């Protein structure tokens, strides 16, 4: 299996230029023997190369069955090679492994459902990324995002004042429509701590506006913090910088615990959920999140069930629903997302396949954060998703995840699908009863 | 620091203000805040047409603002808020705002003698100010703001070198340092976190990330010679000036003092350490095993554990400690290695009496709030209450609460619990 698709990236080039054979061998050995548990070895030893995982992967499906894109093929070219060569791999091979692990696997875990032994290739790729991080071989743009996390505790380089200032700006904007609207800051003892990811204050401020409007109309007792910790996102989890992942989650959870809130409600993000309930919390030795975290899909449905959101009308055009990996395979929100979609829309058209077998957006797992050099990897590597979307015959997609939005928007333009993509919050805000 | 002995400690209940009537006077009333002595209640209020002011004991400030946030009572009872007028920000103290305007100010804290400390952004540069007097040098960015216990000394992590977009090379060479009273350390680092002053405000220490993988501690800009997989916030021994910090080695956490381990690295986590006032004892929140937290005194964990432990408090004499345990949605109070019987929907950081003999905490049960002392609840619960304050002689507890629309202060004998 030869690797013939090297893409130039300043971060990867810089990283491998500093490697020595000794550093490579020592680092790989330290991670595999010192950090990784029995799970990694078990996976490596039990894979039968049956190929059942291949059709689970959108990259494989989009590349005419090229086995180098199959999950087992990607393991063969990364962890498998490391073990076969007894840690003695070259710097160039590390480059290839980094490119595969960071940009050709979204850690979406669809393949787990196809493996007769339940091997989690996403976990294996995470550990390959961990090794690459320890070697300093990470794509430039996602590494810059990790730097932002480390310096500001958010992924968009927002400075400490820019966050509350943005909330106050959105509060002002929303008061033109709802004069009594509030975004209560640092309200100790509120029921809900609303947390978002940094792209919301940076690029998608309308989502903060809409959430504030919905919460105010529904009478939700909520607060948002003024201090760092508000960003629940975590690209360090995806670069393999687990120490920084633990620091981010400590700050996030302690921000909520200090405000004595009952629950965290997180915006429509997928990967952050993985960080708060699985990886980040556990690095900090919390077995589960230290304070309950509810995804917006669950919370919106809760508000609907309680009769706190009333609709003026339903969305009439046919609409399809995309199942984000982290909240569907990770959290099991397929039922709530369907109830919510049907409550909002007259004609929900299911994709094929769907639910836990839905195809990935190809943006998640930090792949979109690897930036422009790898955009075509995502586009060509997800032709199958474009075909799946086109086959629905509808013009609108519901996608309750930021990364999915980014990925689907790019596919939409690249394959000229002409589709519109919405969050649940967009629809609720658009369709709900509003005071005169 | 205000002298609590001058407060009214006569036992009994006194109504301070009919807060319920405020809603008739204003379009809306934001969250209530109680002064430390319980003699005042204040809130940001919306008068009309997006004009805001503050109301304290029914009296509004003369000045109106476009917005007020970060409302806080100073320890001496002054009510403060960060206020916006015409797009500029200042601090209003009892209705009189500072003469200067700023691009943004926030994170108000108070010194023991009444000084007011803020983080400041002016012309997109960042620094700090004390009573409106700003650092001479401002920086491209600053965060992790802190103040010493003299109320004058301030420090923050600052960006001292410019960095272009996605310039990972420059970032990893180091662009951050710590500014103390506006004067920056000589050395730069990849990251710095949580600067902290010693008791005399003569030294500052912080967490440092030297490389992507190596963490250590810096004191006055000089780093420890030993590196760790990770570190958490350091703190100084108030008596000896020694510096301790949780450190991670071999995937486990221990406690280091001046570079060397004083608690072995056996914990799944270890953080939020606190010295006793005399510096003779060191407490911390630790996880002896994954998913199971408790308090350790001088490295020895209590036998009781909970999935989450927060809000560690050490008694003034240093012989006792208390914290909150949390299991799913249920909070308990852990004290001296035992768990109080009460289970609460929420609990606040325990408070020790000055003589260290008693512990009290604000708690929530069935949506109502009260104070629990040594495990026993006060005989009444409230719509809202604040954290308890002990009298200087430790015989009484001040309960500040809102009950049926009335802000009240109750001085209860400890025997009433």
Image (spheres, rainbow, N blue to C red):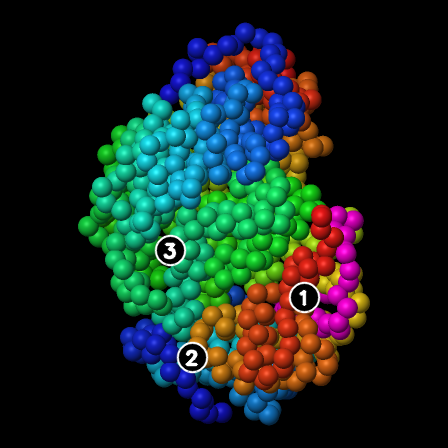
The foreground one among A284 and B338 is A284
Check the image and name the residue furthest to the top. Answer: B10
Q: Position of residue A140 (x, y in %)?
A: 38, 72
- Residue A151's disc is 3
**Are there few (<14), some (14-19), or many (20+) residues within 10 Å of tag 1?**
many
Magenta-span inclusion, residue A135: no
The disc numbered 1 marks a residue on which chain?
Answer: A
Residue drawn at x 69%, y 32% is B367
Q: Which mark is residue A373?
A: 2
Mark 3 neighbour class, 10 Å CA radius: few under 14, some 14 to 19, many 20 or more? many
User: Up-down: is A155 above or below B203?
Assistant: below
- In depth, the one of A252 and B335 nearer the eye is A252
Horizontal side of A104 relative to B184 (left or right) equals: right
Q: How many marks?
A: 3
Q: Residue A175 location, x and y as percent?
A: 58, 46
- The answer to whether mark 2 and mark 1 are in CB contact below 8 A is no
Label 2 sits on a secondary structure element that is helix
Marks 3 and 1 sit apart, C-alpha to C-alpha, by 31 Å
Are the numbered discs 2 and 3 placed on the same chain, yes or no?
yes
Q: Is residue A169 above or below residue B413?
A: below
Q: Chain of mark 3?
A: A
**In the depicted structure, whether residue A105 falls above or below residue B63:** below
> To which quarter of the image does residue A113 belong?
bottom right
Label 1: which residue?
A328
Q: Is residue B220 left or right of residue B76?
A: left
State which mark lies toward you, 2 or 3: 2
Q: Residue A136: horizontal and vertical position, in percent?
A: 36, 70
- Could you tell me which quadrant the C terminus of chain B lies in? top right
* First along the sequence among labels 3 and 1: 3
Q: Which residues are magenta?
A: A307-334
Nearest the camera: A78 or B384?
A: B384
Q: Measure the alpha-carbon separation of dots 2 and 1.
A: 29 Å
């Amino acid at each position: 299996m030869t690797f013939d698709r090297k893409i130039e990236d300043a971060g990867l080039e810089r990283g491998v230029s500093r490697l020595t054979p000794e550093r490579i061998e020592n680092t790989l050995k330290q991670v595999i023997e010192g950090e990784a548990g029995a799970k990694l070895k078990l996976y490596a030893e039990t894979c039968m190369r049956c190929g059942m995982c291949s059709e689970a992967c959108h990259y494989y499906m989009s590349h005419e069955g090229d086995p180098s894109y199959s999950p087992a093929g990607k393991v063969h070219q990364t962890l498998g090679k490391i073990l076969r060569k007894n840690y003695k791999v070259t710097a160039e091979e590390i480059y290839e492994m980094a490119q595969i692990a960071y940009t050709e696997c979204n850690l979406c875990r669809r393949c787990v459902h196809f493996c007769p032994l339940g091997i989690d290739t996403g976990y294996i790729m995470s550990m390959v990324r961990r090794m690459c991080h320890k070697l300093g071989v990470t794509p430039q743009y996602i590494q810059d995002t990790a730097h932002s996390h480390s310096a500001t505790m958010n992924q968009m380089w927002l400075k400490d004042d820019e966050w509350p200032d943005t909330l106050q700006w959105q509060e002002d904007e929303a008061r033109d429509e709802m004069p009594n609207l509030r975004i209560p800051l640092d309200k100790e003892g509120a029921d809900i701590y609303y947390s978002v990811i940094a792209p919301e204050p940076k690029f998608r401020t309308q989502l903060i506006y809409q959430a504030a409007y919905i919460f105010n109309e529904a009478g939700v007792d909520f607060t948002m913090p003024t201090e760092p910790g508000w960003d629940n996102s975590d690209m360090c989890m995806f670069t393999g910088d687990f120490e920084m992942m633990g620091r981010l989650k400590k700050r996030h959870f302690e921000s909520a615990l200090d405000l004595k809130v009952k629950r965290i409600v997180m915006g429509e993000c997928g990967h952050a959920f993985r960080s708060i309930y699985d990886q980040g919390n556990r690095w900090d030795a919390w077995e589960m999140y230290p304070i309950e975290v509810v995804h917006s899909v669950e919370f919106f449905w809760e508000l609907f069930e309680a009769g706190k959101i009333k609709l003026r009308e339903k969305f009439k055009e046919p609409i399809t629903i995309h199942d984000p990996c982290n909240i569907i395979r990770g959290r099991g929100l397929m039922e709530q997302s369907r109830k919510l979609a049907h409550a909002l829309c007259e004609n929900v058209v299911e994709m094929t396949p769907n639910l836990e077998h839905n195809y990935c957006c190809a943006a998640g797992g930090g792949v979109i954060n690897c930036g422009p050099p790898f955009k075509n990897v995502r586009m060509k590597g997800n032709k199958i998703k474009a075909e799946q979307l086109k086959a629905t015959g509808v013009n609108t997609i519901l996608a309750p995840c930021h990364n999915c939005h980014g990925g689907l928007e790019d596919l939409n333009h690249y394959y000229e699908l002409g589709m519109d993509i919405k969050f649940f919050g967009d629809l609720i805000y658009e369709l709900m009863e509003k005071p005169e | 620091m205000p002298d609590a002995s001058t407060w009214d400690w006569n036992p009994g209940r006194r109504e301070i203000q009919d807060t319920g009537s405020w809603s008739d006077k204003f379009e809306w009333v934001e969250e209530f805040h109680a002064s430390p002595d319980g003699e005042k209640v204040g809130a940001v209020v919306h008068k009309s047409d997006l004009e805001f002011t503050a109301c304290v004991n029914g009296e509004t400030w003369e000045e109106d603002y476009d917005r007020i946030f970060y409302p806080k009572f100073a320890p001496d009872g002054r009510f403060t808020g960060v206020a916006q007028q015409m797009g500029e920000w200042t601090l209003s103290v009892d209705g009189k705002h500072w003469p200067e305007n700023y691009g943004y100010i926030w994170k108000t804290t108070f010194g023991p003698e009444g000084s007011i400390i803020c983080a400041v952004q002016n012309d997109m540069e960042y620094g700090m100010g004390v009573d409106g007097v700003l650092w001479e040098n401002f920086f491209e960015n600053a965060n992790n703001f802190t103040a010493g216990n003299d109320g004058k000394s301030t420090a923050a992590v600052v960006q001292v070198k410019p960095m272009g977009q996605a310039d990972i090379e420059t970032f990893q060479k180091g662009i951050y340092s710590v500014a103390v009273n506006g004067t920056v350390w000589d050395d730069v680092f990849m990251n710095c976190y949580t600067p902290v002053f010693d008791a005399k405000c003569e030294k500052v220490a912080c967490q440092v990330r030297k490389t992507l993988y190596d963490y250590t501690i810096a004191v006055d800009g000089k780093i420890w010679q030993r590196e760790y997989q990770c570190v958490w916030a350091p703190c100084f021994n108030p008596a000896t000036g020694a510096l301790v910090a949780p450190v991670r080695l071999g995937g486990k956490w221990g406690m280091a003092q001046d570079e060397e381990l004083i608690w072995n690295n056996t914990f799944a986590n270890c953080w939020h350490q606190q010295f006793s006032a005399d510096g003779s004892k060191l407490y911390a929140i630790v996880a002896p095993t994954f998913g199971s937290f408790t308090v350790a005194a001088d490295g020895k964990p209590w036998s009781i554990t909970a999935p989450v432990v927060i809000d560690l408090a050490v008694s003034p004499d240093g012989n006792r400690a208390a914290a909150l345990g949390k299991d799913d949605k249920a909070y308990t109070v852990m004290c001296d290695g035992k768990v109080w019987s009460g289970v609460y929907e929420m609990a606040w950081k325990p408070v020790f009496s000055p003589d260290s003999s008693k512990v009290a905490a604000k708690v929530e049960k069935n949506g109502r709030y009260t104070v629990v002392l040594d495990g026993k609840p006060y005989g009444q619960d409230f719509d809202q209450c604040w954290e308890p304050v002990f009298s200087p002689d430790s015989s009484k507890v001040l309960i500040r609460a809102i009950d049926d629309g009335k802000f009240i202060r109750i001085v209860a004998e400890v025997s009433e619990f």
